[in-house]
């Protein structure tokens, strides 16, 4: 008897111990997964221009996903239906994600594509986890409360920026003048972030299950969030926000009736037009920003009319061409044609690799070689473009028709899955939140036509969390959708995939943070420490071209800071080797090519150095005339005057300067041309 009692107590202790481990794991999962959607918007939106503003969130998210799947594995097999459900569209999205992994083998810069693939994996994993963790809406209420509170804080900060005419975002100077950034580097991305929350702020005050604190906060958040969104002066953001607002009642109607939804959808364009007209009437900022679009549309119409008239003049082809060239010059000289010209160049980039593209996250280094239409300016130095300012054109350039097809299929399938969930949500489920999630998706997809809002790490993480909050309670009240065995297979696959993702996330994040420490040491002229950090970073992530390039720049600084010829050659050899490693992993990078050419010329291998410099100058032929100018100077020093003259003439085509014209004159005198 005593033995049985002792055995029973031991079993209870074991169960309590296991339950305690699960509670600790679950709490840790919550903290890790909540960091990106709550913390990344506060730190520049998770922009990868600063590795420390995105790498910790990528690592936290993937670790949270891995621990989520592991915590579910410890449960009793008989309870698996209670702790693990398959979110709407998640299986198809995961399958498409795995198929898109083939782009890793076709990318021109595999390391950058690996990072992009990893980021998408964290978004997808977070969606799986949040949908299961937030099956009880009482938990979802707390997450919505925190999201709304953070958005209100960022909005108030943006309003203060506008009122005080501040030009700082946190501790960095902004380049957007009078437009409100909040804590984001770009006002357009702040506008998208606020637009994501807008449909939820609209429905929560009417949702009794939300509770009074959240309902009041959502109602109060409408004022600062819409005000800050207006102050961003983001045309794409305004259009996305109006789309989200108009789509919200449409999807609420869909909950009850398909016919009502179709009627509401037919009326939606007129409501959006009315909203835009109202903004035009009351907002000077909207008139100023929208007026540029109207002016450009007017110019396009006039150009089209002139082209038709030119075609009617028989035998005047030469005059017609001259007219069209002058019209084109007038069009592209306007400030507001930046996006159309960039998109035209993006299509040229796509034409070279139409099916699989150049590789995810490679746009920044490849687009300079395709710049043609975006080379006409008003005399100011053209800007760099890290993305195509349209997610769809950016995707078609980086992943080709196949990538665009995968993305569009995933979107359509997602709409279908969430609409099915909205229509079939059982009583007691907050169906209004599912409608808000669909409206959120509609708004951000419209915004994405004119901007690269998916590239900011914070915004897709917020979308994953909001989708989980919307779908989780309805999913919990429905019957099981898959047999137990299939769900356990999915759970095991999730564990394997998340552990692999965790390895690459830690590799990317730790390497990036160590490299950042090396950058700080280099700025402080602690060269030995910097070299140690850069070598450690490249050891952790061997294909990290950034670590190799930073090391090459450090050796370049050492070479140029000494007067001893022997020391210069000593450091130049290390510089060459580091730059070559960087070039292997990022061949289209013109900066690396130019630096590699310089060091080869210094070491005496002038022919190879000139080849690297020519390749770099050709890539940057539109964007930066200094590349051809420097190439011309080196050729001039080597006595290769004809080649130097050609280089200076190319530099003059990009942007003639006094020094370039003097060199052209001098070289023509020497060559007799």
Image (cartoon, rainbow, N blue to C red):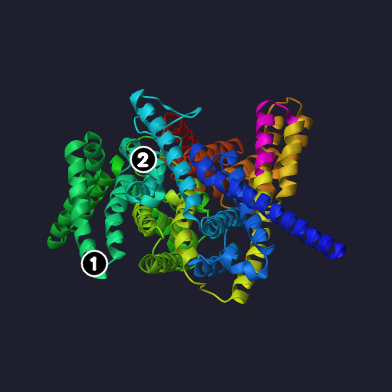
- Residue drawn at x 83%, y 65% is 4
In this rendered view, identify the residue nearer to me: 297 or 653: 297
Res 74 quadrant in image: bottom right
Q: Which residue is mark 1?
A: 262
Q: Residues within 10 Å of mark 2 (few under 14, many from 20)?
A: some
Residue 204 numbered mark, or none:
none
In this rendered view, identify the residue nearer to me: 130 or 508: 130
| Quadrant of the rendering where the N terminus is positioned | bottom right
Secondary structure of the residue carrying numbered label 2 = helix
Residue 585: horizontal and vertical position, in percent?
A: 64, 53
**Camera-nearest label, 1 or 2:** 2
Residue 451 visible: no
The magenta segment is 512-527
Residue 563 visible: yes
For the residues labelled 1 and 2, the Cα–Cα distance comes to 32 Å
Residue 216 numbered mark, or none:
2
Q: Is residue 271 left or right of residue 392?
A: left
Q: Residues within 10 Å of mark 1 (few under 14, many from 20)?
A: some
Residue 376 colored in magenta in the image: no
């Amino acid at each position: 008897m005593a033995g049985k009692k002792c055995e029973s107590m031991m079993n209870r202790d074991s169960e309590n111990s296991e339950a305690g481990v699960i509670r600790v794991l679950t709490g840790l999962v919550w903290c890790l997964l909540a960091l990106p959607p709550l913390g990344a918007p506060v730190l520049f939106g998770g922009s990868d221009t600063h590795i420390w503003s995105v790498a910790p969130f990528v690592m936290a998210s993937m670790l949270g996903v891995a621990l989520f799947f592991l915590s579910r594995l410890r449960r009793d097999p008989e309870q698996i239906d209670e702790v693990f459900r398959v979110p709407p569209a998640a299986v198809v999205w995961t399958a498409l994600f795995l198929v898109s992994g083939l782009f890793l083998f076709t990318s021109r810069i595999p390391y950058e594509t690996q990072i992009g693939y990893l980021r998408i994996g964290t978004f997808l994993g977070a969606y799986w986890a949040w949908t299961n963790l937030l099956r009880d809406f009482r938990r979802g209420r707390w997450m919505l409360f925190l999201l709304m509170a953070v958005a209100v804080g960022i909005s108030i900060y943006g309003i203060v920026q506008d009122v005080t005419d501040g030009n700082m975002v946190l501790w960095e100077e902004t380049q957007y003048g009078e437009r409100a950034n909040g804590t984001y580097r770009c006002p357009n991305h702040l506008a998208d972030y606020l637009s994501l929350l807008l449909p939820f702020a609209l429905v929560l005050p009417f949702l009794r299950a939300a509770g009074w604190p959240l309902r009041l906060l959502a109602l109060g958040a409408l004022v600062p969030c819409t005000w800050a969104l207006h102050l961003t002066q983001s045309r794409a953001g305004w259009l996305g926000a109006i789309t989200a607002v108009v789509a919200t009642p449409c999807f609420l109607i869909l909950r009850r009736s398909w016919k009502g939804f179709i009627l509401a959808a037919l009326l939606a364009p007129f409501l959006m037009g009315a909203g835009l007209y109202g903004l035009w009437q009351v907002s000077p900022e909207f008139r100023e920003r929208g007026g540029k679009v109207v002016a450009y549309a007017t110019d396009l119409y006039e150009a089209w009319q002139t082209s038709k008239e030119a075609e009617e003049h028989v035998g005047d082809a030469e005059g017609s061409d001259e007219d069209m060239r002058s019209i084109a010059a007038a069009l592209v000289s306007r400030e507001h044609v930046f996006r159309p010209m960039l998109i035209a160049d993006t299509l040229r980039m796509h034409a070279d690799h139409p099916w699989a593209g150049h590789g995810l996250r490679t746009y920044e280094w490849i687009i300079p070689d395709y710049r043609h239409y975006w080379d006409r300016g008003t005399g100011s130095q053209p800007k760099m473009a890290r993305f195509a300012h349209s997610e769809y054109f950016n995707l078609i350039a980086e992943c080709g028709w196949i990538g665009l097809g995968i993305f569009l299929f995933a979107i359509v399938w997602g709409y279908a899955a969430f609409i099915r969930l909205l229509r079939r949500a059982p009583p007691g489920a907050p169906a209004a939140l599912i409608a808000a999630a669909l409206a959120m998706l509609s708004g951000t997809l419209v915004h994405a036509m004119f901007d690269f809002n998916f590239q900011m790490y914070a915004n897709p993480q917020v979308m994953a969390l909001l989708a989980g909050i919307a779908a989780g309670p309805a999913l919990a009240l429905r019957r099981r959708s898959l047999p137990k065995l299939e769900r356990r297979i999915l759970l095991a696959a999730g564990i394997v995939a998340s552990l692999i993702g965790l390895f690459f996330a830690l590799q990317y994040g730790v390497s990036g943070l160590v490299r950042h420490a090396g950058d700080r040491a280099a700025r402080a002229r602690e060269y030995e420490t910097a070299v140690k950090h850069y070598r450690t970073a490249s050891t952790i992530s061997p294909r990290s071209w950034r670590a190799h390039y930073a090391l090459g720049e450090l050796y370049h600084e050492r070479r140029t800071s000494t007067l001893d010829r022997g020391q210069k050659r000593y450091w130049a050899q290390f510089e060459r080797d580091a730059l070559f490693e960087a070039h292997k992993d990022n061949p289209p990078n013109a900066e690396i090519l130019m630096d590699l050419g310089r060091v080869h010329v210094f070491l005496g291998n002038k022919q190879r150095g000139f080849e690297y410099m020519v390749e770099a100058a050709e890539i940057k032929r539109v964007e930066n005339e200094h590349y051809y100018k420097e190439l011309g100077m080196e050729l001039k020093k080597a006595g290769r005057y004809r080649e130097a003259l050609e280089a200076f003439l190319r530099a003059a085509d990009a942007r003639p300067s006094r020094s370039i014209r003097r060199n052209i004159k001098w070289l023509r005198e020497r060559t007799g041309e």
